[in-house]
């Protein structure tokens, strides 16, 4: 007699007490909860223990949204109301435990400037993937790490296509990563020789969510295909001439592994802009923060001030010069964007007052549920 398959639970999909507590606070108890697995042109594919649904957001969510961040993202937990034939209405978005987002100059579908792009929500670990070729860039690792840690996500490194290097060359690159990033998880992998893949699989836990981030062509989708045990995701090779990948993955999508782990594939981007991630920058460059405690001035920018312990450490060689330069660049970018965010939040507060008045007016004419 065949063993009966284990029944899927919400915990298998990443649900926990954090989301249940907020579900009750928001009084979504009458609705089922589901997880957003993909989004296409405003329609969301969601999954729960009863199956998968195509869900569309309600007018209430649109009305209350102050920015793109208020709309669902891949990885979000949402309250849904089933309407039959695999369709559902999306009634609300539960608060996010962690978030990965980047600054962008892109425009949304309405042609309006959208400064912030949601990469994914409720992620436990972000695998930052680079290949050993021209894509390899320590500064980019630090940038991704700052964004991840600012959003409460633990970053890890995947150095892919290591079959292209001799062992001594690989050891040198791994040493460079450890010197710059410290004690972090590093996986040296190859989809051709399958080196490092068993170790990667061992570190993907049931009910936990992992996103794969990096430039196009570094092998994110190929790695996920191997984890899935199937060629589900289209892949493309890096151009031999330009050593740059083609954009094969065109949207974020969540996949569920047989072992219980949850992975998200992302379109490749060569650069990610910081939002207002000063805390994330400080976390990644913790040794600079330690030197900064010895600076003469509390508001030292570590660029020109007399008595700056960070500059002294850089000049003496106690602090890596390239790491220092990247810190200054990222901190300047984060401060600028923090000031911009403050202005946007102030505008949002004014908009919020307008929304509250509009809601009051709607209630007065009997549209209570809009």
Image (cartoon, rainbow, N blue to C red):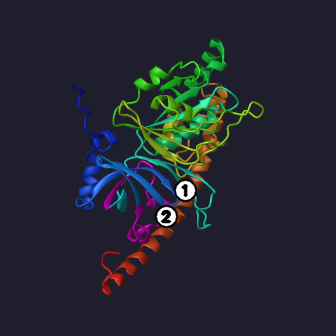
Q: Which residue is mark 2?
A: 67
Name the one closer to the observer, 72 or 322: 72
- Marks 1 and 2 close (CB-CB < 8 Å): yes
Relative image position of residue 137 (x, y in whole percent): 65, 32
Mark yes or no: residue 301 visible: no
Q: Quadrant of residue 160?
A: top right
Q: Which mark is residue 301?
A: none
User: Magenta part of the protein: which range?
Assistant: 56-83
Mark yes or no: residue 318 visible: yes
- The residue at 51%/61% (across/down) is 342
Q: Of the residues under marks 1 and 2, which one precedes in the sequence? A: 2
Relative image position of residue 38 (x, y in whole percent): 46, 50
- The residue at 31%/61% (across/down) is 81
Q: Is residue 66 a member of the stretch shown in magenta?
A: yes
Q: Which mark is residue 116?
A: 1
Label 2, secondary structure: give it. Answer: loop
Name the one closer to the observer, 12 or 126: 12
What's the distance in space between the residues labelled 1 and 2, CA to CA?
Answer: 9 Å
Q: Residues within 10 Å of mark 1 (few under 14, many from 20)?
A: some
Relative image position of residue 64 (x, y in whole percent): 41, 69
- The residue at 30%/45% (across/down) is 15
């Amino acid at each position: 007699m065949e063993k009966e398959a284990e029944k899927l639970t919400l915990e298998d999909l990443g649900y926990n007490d954090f989301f249940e507590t907020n579900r009750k606070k928001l009084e979504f108890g009458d609705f089922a909860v589901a997880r957003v697995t993909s989004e296409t042109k405003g329609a969301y594919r969601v999954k729960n223990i009863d199956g998968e649904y195509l869900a569309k957001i309600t007018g209430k969510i649109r009305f209350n949204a102050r920015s793109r961040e208020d709309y669902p993202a891949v990885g979000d937990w949402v309250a849904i109301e089933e309407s039959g034939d695999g369709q559902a209405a999306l009634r609300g978005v539960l608060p996010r435990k962690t978030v990965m987002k980047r600054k962008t100059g892109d425009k949304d579908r309405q042609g309006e400037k959208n400064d912030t792009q949601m990469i994914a929500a409720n992620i436990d670990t972000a695998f930052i993937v680079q290949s050993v070729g021209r894509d390899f860039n320590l500064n980019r690792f630090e940038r991704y790490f700052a964004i991840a840690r600012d959003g409460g996500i633990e970053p890890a490194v995947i150095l892919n296509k290591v079959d292209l290097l001799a062992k001594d060359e690989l050891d040198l690159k791994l040493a460079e990563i450890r010197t710059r990033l410290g004690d972090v998880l590093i996986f040296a992998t190859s989809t051709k020789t399958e080196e490092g893949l068993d170790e990667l699989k061992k570190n993907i836990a049931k009910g936990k969510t992992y996103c794969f981030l990096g430039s196009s062509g570094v092998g994110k989708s190929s790695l996920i295909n191997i984890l899935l045990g199937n060629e589900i995701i289209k892949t493309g090779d890096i151009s031999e001439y330009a050593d740059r990948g083609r954009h094969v993955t065109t949207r974020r999508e969540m996949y569920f592994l047989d072992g219980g782990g949850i992975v998200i594939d992302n379109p490749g981007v060569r650069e990610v802009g910081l939002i207002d991630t000063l805390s994330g920058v400080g976390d990644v460059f913790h040794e600079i923060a330690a030197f900064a405690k010895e600076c003469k001035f509390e508001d030292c920018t570590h660029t020109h001030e007399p008595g700056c312990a960070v500059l002294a450490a850089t000049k003496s060689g106690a602090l890596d010069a390239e790491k220092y330069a990247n810190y200054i660049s990222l901190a300047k970018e984060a401060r600028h964007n923090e000031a911009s965010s403050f202005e946007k939040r102030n505008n949002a507060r004014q908009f919020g007052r307008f929304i509250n008045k509009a809601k009051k007016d709607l209630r007065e004419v009997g549209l209570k549920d809009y």
